[in-house]
Amino acid sequence: MRRREFIRLFSSTVVAWPLTARAQQPTKPAVGFLGLEPNPIFVAAVRQGLSESGYVPGQNIAIEYRWAEGRTDRLPALATDLVHRQVTVIVAYGTPAVAAAKAATATVPIVFDTGADPVASGFVASLNRPGGNLTGVTVLLAEIVPKQFELLREMVPTASTIAFLYNPTNRTLAEPITREAQAAAKSLGFKLNVMQAKSAMPSQS
């Protein structure tokens, strides 16, 4: 993740959001985190951005964490809860969380970090002029898959079969990433074994 870029983006969103938009918010601004699971590095980056802008959690700013414990179906309710709590800004980590936050509010500013194309996903109007209440950063995961396969060919030139894992619960990314992987594998002469990975840990029998 482009840590310093995100810190600057997030800090400017909290500090510079129009006062009229804050008029209906509590006196102490509140940041709402939303995601499938906690990401300590991501959270630390945001908290550093707050600190560099003069915000100290528990003193002049509040933080609300809403993690869905890996369950995409829980995100809409968690996003709605943050809106009802009148947070000043929602920090959405991951594509499913961004989609849930966008569906929950058209007024609360949302700063996102996603691997999907935010334009194709309908999150923003364009990359240079996002419009609406969403802005953020993306690593365009689907678009870099061919390059990953090319690097793999250079690193292991004798490889003939690749196991490709993807998360089928991430509907925004699953299809384009798999499509790019299949095309790249065919182009480079790899046999591709596509496998689903729905959780970080294998289920216990």
Image (cartoon, rainbow, N blue to C red):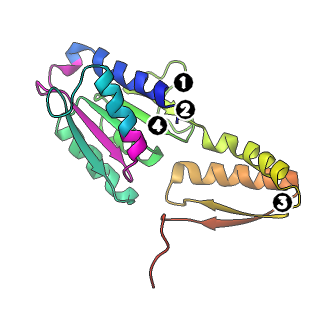
SS at circle 2: loop
In this rendering, does residue 155 appear at all? yes
Q: Position of residue 4 (x, y in %)?
A: 47, 26
- Tell me which label, 4 or 2, sits earlier in the chain: 4
Q: CA distance from mark 4 to mark 2?
A: 13 Å
In the depicted structure, whether residue 134 falls above or below residue 73: above
Q: Which residue type carries mark 3?
A: Phe
Q: Residues within 10 Å of mark 2 (few under 14, many from 20)?
A: few
Residue at x 32%, y 50% (from the top left corner): 76
Q: CA distance from mark 4 to mark 3?
A: 31 Å
**Numbered circle sitting on residue 190:** 3
Q: Residues within 10 Å of mark 1 (few under 14, many from 20)?
A: few
Q: Residues within 10 Å of mark 3 (few under 14, many from 20)?
A: some
Q: CA distance from mark 1 to mark 4?
A: 16 Å
Question: Left of 195 or right of it: where is 64?
Answer: left
**Numbered circle sitting on residue 126:** 1
Q: Which residue is mark 4?
A: 113
Question: Left of 129 or right of it: where is 54?
Answer: left
Question: Is label 2 in contact with label 1 (beta carbons under 8 Å)?
Answer: yes
Give the position of the C terminus as an image quadrant.
bottom left
Q: In this rendering, which labeled residue sits more in front, label 1 or label 4?
A: 4
SS at circle 3: loop
Q: CA distance from mark 3 to mark 1?
A: 35 Å
In the image, residue 27 lies in the stretch drawn in magenta: yes
Q: Which residue type carries mark 2?
A: Val
In the image, residue 31 lies in the stretch drawn in magenta: yes
**Numbered circle sitting on residue 119:** 2
